[in-house]
Image (tube, rainbow, N blue to C red):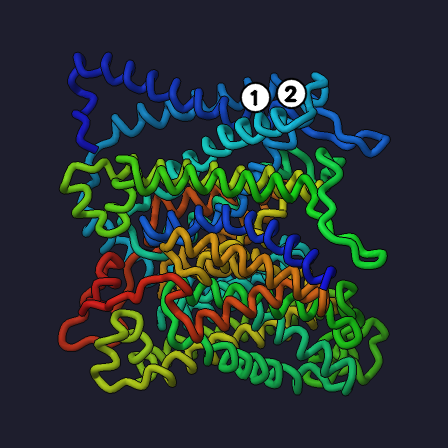
Amino acid sequence: MAYALQQLINGISLGMIYGLIAVGYTMVYGIIGMINFAHGDIFMVGAFVALVAILMLMSGGLMDGPAAILLVLAISMAFTALYGWTVERVAYRPLRGSFRLAPLISAIGMSIVLQNFVQVSQGARVKPLEPQLPGGFELMRDGNFVVQLSYMQTLIIVSTLAVLAVFTWLVTRTALGRAMRACEQDRKMASLLGINTDRTISLAFVIGAALAAVAGTLYLLRYGIADFFMGFIVGVKAFTAAVLGGIGSLPGAVLGGLLIGLIETFWSAYFSVQYKDVAAFGILVLALIFLPTGLLGRQEVEKV
Amino acid sequence: MTSPPAAAPHAFQPRLLAALLDASKATAVAFGLFVVMVGLRTDVGPTGALFLRTRWPDVAWLCAAVFVARLAMALWAGRRLPAVGSARRAAALSRAGLFFGPALLAIALILPFVPGIGRYELDLGILVLTYVMLGWGLNIVVGLAGLLDLGYVAFYAVGAYSYALLAQYFGLSFWICLPLAGILAAFWGVLLGFPVLRLRGDYLAIVTLAFGEIIRIVLLNWVELTGGPNGISGIPRPTFFGLPFSMSGGPGTFAGFFGLEPSPSHRVIFLYYLILALALLTNWVAIRIRRQPIGRAWEALREDEIACRALGINITNTKLTAFALGAMFAGFAGAFFATRQAFISPESFTFIESAIILAIVVLGGLGSQIGIAVAAIIMIGGFELFRDLEEYRMLVFGAAMVTIMVLRPRGLVGSRAPSVVLGAQRRIDAQHVSEGRG
């Protein structure tokens, strides 16, 4: 029981991170209908920017307390958003209106570029980072086993909820959010009504990258490692989460993220750690076979 | 480009100014991109702790490079003349293409005997031909049937492991295992094809990617059978229909049987011709089958699935045969890969391989056989050419992928002859393929 509770906490905090990345996938897919293959690598860039920011603050002796972590988050979001914008501008915008496979190949190329750019500029070694926020709340004691909600997990859950609240407000209450939703429904019509679709798409990439940066920073702080290849598998799982939740649906992405996080954690805890990725992908396959539109996705009407 | 031609002198100054402004903006963005990731490098110190190393000059150089490149690009784009009759150019290209294919084939046939072609060049040729074969195989799935497969390397892995395991546990020879590897891979193609029948487009892509990863993870973790990350070594080398390539030169060996001086290059030349034959077989089957009812059904499926169903084409069979046939050729290529390397491990079957093969197919122009061959030569040969760049090689590779896609979204050979024609032969421009005129 205590063990399961602990896994539940771990799963939720991991799922929150997946959810943040999944929102970026689902948003881009909803608006321009492409898999942004480089999004996982944007997450990785976010983790690296956060790592550099933490080391800078450390060398200045400023790296302590929640204020410093907030500063790191802000720095990471700002620089990673720039990466998101550039990727869209360089690799996707020239291919808008081209046939379906072209942006996908371009995205795969961009993913290779980002990975290898970071490998060249930051080195191929795995970067270890000592825990920045040790300790936690003790929730329950069962014999020798202590169920703990660490401060780090609290931070993950609180900051994810805060970021998602801001994001929801942005999408549902602002002019930008309206423009984004309009583009998602019908891009041509939206542009006829005077919405600058290029700008809206750019901003969707910027917002997605900023969310991925939050995920990257939290992942780095929680697991204490960063390497140039970390974006691939996390990215695929986050995309799985987006598909599971119903691609194009923003609450679905978060729900899917939580589910994937929980499945992965419980699978590693009770079955085998080696096959945890197989579990996540297996869920994806099953979800698509039995629930092609995802949990919260709309049924797509096919017009002939 | 709507900007006026450079002939008007008064138009020059504002254009230069605009170009300078544009380049400055690009440089500002570049500074933002590089200042953290290049300017500050995290290094692991001797105690295991991280420390930062600054590299400001590199950032300055990169920003300067971006400024110059962007300025040159803006000025060049402004100067560019309107494209001259692309139809005439396409016609000239297609005339050249008539000779290009046979010429390429002739070069491929005599390559081992061209003076100056050594072991290294032949090995490179084998590598390129392997990718040509994989590209042609994947083209059946992606280019003809229009099913986006991001996990093609899984079938390559199935083929390679089939041969390696059958040879290791049952001592079967390469020539028995080659068809078996193809059959097993085709079987897996059907097996993986079944669940994804209802999916389309990008969903299909992500599920095939997931399948590819699942197979790789299983190969990695099923240590008792596959050796896990250590892979399988000591895979038997191929024989010349039973005659081994041995340096001893005895009567039972290739050199002894034909009365030749034993030489290590015999095996390389044999492998080269083997993969050339396999690749040509793939090509031949693909070209022939395109005219068969099943091939036409694939192309119809690619253009419009609903219309296809309305015409009474069995979608299930059509999709599954495409998966199976594509997978079969990957299985052949995998068995060849295993016997050539004599060592395989899950390392060789990562997602990046699938991405490279798909990139070859798309860059070559979907459905164009010769385009895929050229794309494979450019991508894999170019990759080897940049060997000196070492760690920058993959970076250049990815950048090349993006650049080619942005400049030529339809691939290198953007037009092709229709598979089936009624009446006069006319060329189909690739722009129309997705609109259902191919």
- Could you tell me which residue is drawn at 53 percent across and 28 percent down? A74
Residue at horizontal 36 percent and vertical 55 percent from the top: A248
Subunit under mark 1: B
Query: Residue shown at 46%/68% (left/top)?
Result: B138
| Residue nearer the viewer, A224 or B155 | A224
Disc 2: which chain? B
Find residue A73 and report its image quarter: top right
Mark 1 near mark 2, Cβ–Cβ under 8 Å?
yes
Report which residue position mark 2 lands on: B55
Q: Which of the pair B76/A79 is nearer the observer?
A: A79
Q: Residue B253 carries which label?
A: none
| Amino acid carrying mark 2 in the image | Arg
Task: Return the residue at label 1.
Answer: B59
The answer to whether any part of residue B113 appears in the image is no
Position of B41 with respect to B10 (left or right) is right
Residue B90 lies, in percent from the top left, at 24, 53
- Mark 1: which secondary structure? helix
Query: Of residues A294 and B53, which is closer to you in this image?
Result: A294
Question: How far across and down, in percent of the image, does residue A235 sit?
Answer: 54, 51
Q: Are marks 1 and 2 on the same chain?
A: yes
The amino acid beneath tag 1 is Val
Residue B27 seen from this side: yes
Q: Is mark 2 on a helix, strand or loop?
A: loop
Q: Quadrant of the N terminus of chain A?
A: bottom right
Could you tell me residue B292's position as x and y percent?
32, 84
* The quarter of the displayed image where residue B306 is located: bottom left
